[in-house]
Amino acid sequence: MLKKILKKARESGGLDDREALELLQVPGGDALARIMETAFEVKRERSRIVKLTSTVHITNQCRITPKCKYCGFAAGTSPDGYYHPFFKTDNEILDAIIKIEESGIPRVSCSGAYGFHGEQAVTAARIVKGHSSLELLVNVGPDLTGEALDQLSRYGTDTICCNLETVNRQLFKSVKPGESLEERIRICDRISEQGIELSSGLLIGLGESHKDRVQHLRFLERFESLGEIPIMGFNPYRGTPMENHPPCSLPEQMKTIAVTRLLYPEIRITVPTPTIGPKNVRFSLLAGADNLATVIPANYPLDIKGVGSPVCGSLSEVLEVIGELGLKPQMNTPVSPAKRGVLALN
């Protein structure tokens, strides 16, 4: 049966829910290797290019109460995360994007905690689009007003991320007691209606079933501007209510990435280096991912901790892995300081 499903995915494209579920339920071993091989072939036929996305964390001063049970990003949630509150100044954001652009990384994600009605995202868009040629993704979850969406559009924001994380409503309410899944869905609808590319993905290993994952991936089809699906594996942060919850295994992450690629042959699949672990980045690519996020260049000026895990992937490490797999990183021509001065004046 596995052979038949993979042949269908390879030759005619697409899987039905039963077939997707069957792939997610394989135990691992040779069966998982065959699924990953098929997904990798599908990805390579589309493109051998791997997009790279760096990051700027704007603020960790989250106003959601009670906090998400797994969060190590918000102030005061974990001694291994961003424990002390911060709000990056305009100059700090600018310094970071300069280093990112000088490295040749083509894209930056600017993310921040909830509670500012999108103002933190708009500030980031103004700085990034006014002082660089970087592609921009902003992620402040559902913390966006209509006015903020309009401003993000006017500044030329390329992508807005609002992860649903899980569509199992009971599980969502359990692990995110201060939030509403319906509100996240509403914001995804509004982003799509605005015509801005939507990024929305899954946080796996929270306690959801394989069937939940298939339903989630199908649910994302409703968003017309969906262009990116992040697949994030759960990692416990010390000091949080879920610190003893087991991390999502590598095989579960690989299966989910591969099935997502077979369901969405043309979409960008993002894997943050912290959630997969920098040493495991190669496996995400072999499973069909084509965007590595939280890639940190040399001489990055800010203290950086990954969302989902404090450890991030360095640009040099990521480039080495991409080359070893016969893939090509999407890199821009690095911007020299001299050229930067001309750009800044204009």
Image (cartoon, rainbow, N blue to C red):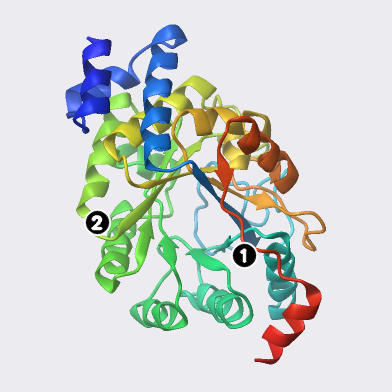
- Distance between the Cα atoms at labels 2 and 1? 29 Å
In the image, residue 246 sits, relative to residue 300, either above or below, namely above
> Which residue is the extreme one toward the bottom?
345
Q: Position of residue 119 (x, y in %)?
A: 51, 78
Check disc 2 and report its element: helix, strand or loop. Answer: loop
Check disc 1 and report its element: helix, strand or loop. Answer: loop
**Residue drawn at (27%, 35%) of the image:** 263
Q: Quadrant of the N terminus?
A: top left
Residue of label 2: 223
Q: Which amino acid lies under the numbered mark 1 shown in the image of this protein? A: Gln
197, 191: nearer the viewer: 197
Q: Earlier in the sequence, mark 2 or mark 1?
A: 1
Figure quadrant of residue 172: top left
Q: Which amino acid lies under the numbered mark 2 shown in the image of this protein? A: Phe
Q: Dot 1: few (<14), some (14–19), or many (≥20) neighbours within 10 Å?
A: many
77, 280: nearer the viewer: 280
Figure quadrant of residue 319: top right
